[in-house]
Image (cartoon, rainbow, N blue to C red):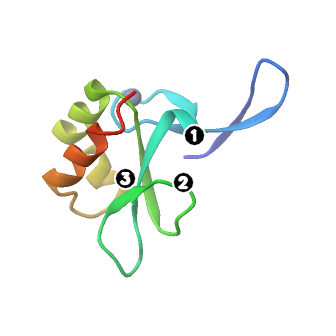
């Protein structure tokens, strides 16, 4: 799901939807998890890795909820190991 919205200054910004709370936020406010075609699911620190991606807010509630409802799994259409969720929590803001 991709949208464009305007920020307060009228500039276009790209927003993505958190799989847990389903709020749309600016990409920089979200963590991206990506499943590359030929690799394991990982956290996409650059936000631009090729592959199927899913987004979650940088907060523990959304990360825990994403794990509970398997939102990231659905987003990337692959299994997401527990360790990856633990890794995500390190990015919490
Ligand atoms: Zn969220």
Give the x, y percent position of residue 33: 39, 54
- Residue 56 vertical placement versus 36 (above, below): above
Q: Is mark 1 within 8 Å of ligand 1?
A: no
**What residue is shown at x 34% (from left), y 61% (from top)?**
42
SS for callout 3? helix
User: Depth-wise, is mark 3 or mark 2 nearer the camera?
Assistant: 2
Q: Distance between the residues labelled 3 and 2?
A: 15 Å
Q: Does the residue labelled 2 lie within 8 Å of ligand 1?
A: no
SS for callout 2? loop
Q: Distance between the residues labelled 2 and 1?
A: 8 Å
Left or right: 10 as drawn, with respect to 21: right
Check disc 2 and report the residue beneath it: 47
**The disc label shown at residue 27, or none:** 1
- Which label's residue is closer to the chain start, 1 or 3? 1
Q: Distance between the residues labelled 1 and 3?
A: 16 Å
- Which label's residue is closer to the chain start, 3 or 2? 2
Image-quarter location of ligand 1: top left
- Residue 29 vertical placement versus 37 (above, below): above
SS for callout 1? helix
**What residue is shown at x 72% (from left), y 36% (from top)?**
13
Give the x, y percent position of residue 70: 22, 45
Q: Are marks 2 and 1 in contact (CB under 8 Å)?
A: yes
- Residue 42 vertical placement versus 29 (above, below): below
The answer to which quarter of the image holds residue 79 is bottom left
Where, quadrant-wise, is the C terminus in this rendering? top left
Check disc 3 and report the residue beneath it: 75
The answer to which quarter of the image holds residue 14 is top right
- Residue 61 vertical placement versus 19 (above, below): above
């Amino acid at each position: 799901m991709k949208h464009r919205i305007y920020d307060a200054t009228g500039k276009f910004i790209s927003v993505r939807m958190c799989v847990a709370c389903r709020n749309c936020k600016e990409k920089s406010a979200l963590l991206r998890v990506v499943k590359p075609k030929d690799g394991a699911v990982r956290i996409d620190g650059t936000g631009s890795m090729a592959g199927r991606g899913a987004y979650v807010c940088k907060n523990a509630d959304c990360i825990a909820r994403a794990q509970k409802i398997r939102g990231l799994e659905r987003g990337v259409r692959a299994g997401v190991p527990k360790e990856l969720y633990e890794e995500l929590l390190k990015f919490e803001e």
